[in-house]
Amino acid sequence: MPDFRDRAACRDAAVDPEWFFPTADPRAKTYKAEAARAKAVCGRCLVRSACLEAILAVPGPKDKDGITAGLDPEERDVIRVRRANQADRTRRAAPASSRRPVTV
């Protein structure tokens, strides 16, 4: 069964895997320039959304390096927090009758 990664733009022979791991500190001015090449590759990737969902399934501390799905670790953490907040708001907005009882 083919994996989405087999169709990823980053698998192209002309793409250097090192592009996805900028060496500069994310707070340094040179970081954006280093990350731009990888983000451009991701920007034209047909499986970017599948890649994003796969990396977001990885727990935060294990997802600390590199550009994946066009995002660096801090940008991916922002999405994780937004999704968690949305899930929490949705849970709180559900009618009491649809909530599962808490058993101790």
Image (cartoon, rainbow, N blue to C red):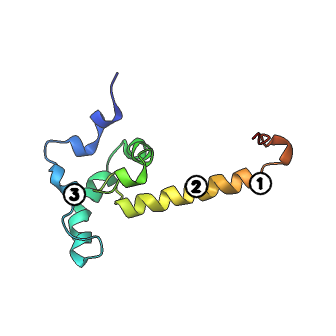
Q: Are marks 1 and 2 in contact (CB under 8 Å)?
A: no
Quadrant of the image occupied by residue 32: bottom left
Badge 1 amino acid = Ala
Q: Nearer the viewer, residue 64 or 10?
A: 64
Quadrant the C terminus occupies: top right
From the image, tell me which residue sits under label 2: 84
Q: Is residue 25 above or below residue 78?
A: below
Q: Which mark is residue 101?
A: none
Which residue shows up at 31% across the image and 52% down it?
Answer: 42
From the image, tell me which residue sits under label 1: 93
From the image, tell me which residue sits under label 3: 21
Q: Earlier in the sequence, mark 1 or mark 3?
A: 3
Left or right relative to 100: residue 28: left
Q: Secondary structure at mark 1?
A: helix
Left or right relative to 59: residue 32: left
Percent position (x, y) of residue 76?
Answer: 42, 57
Q: Is residue 14 above or below residue 78?
A: above
Q: Is residue 4 above or below residue 75?
A: above
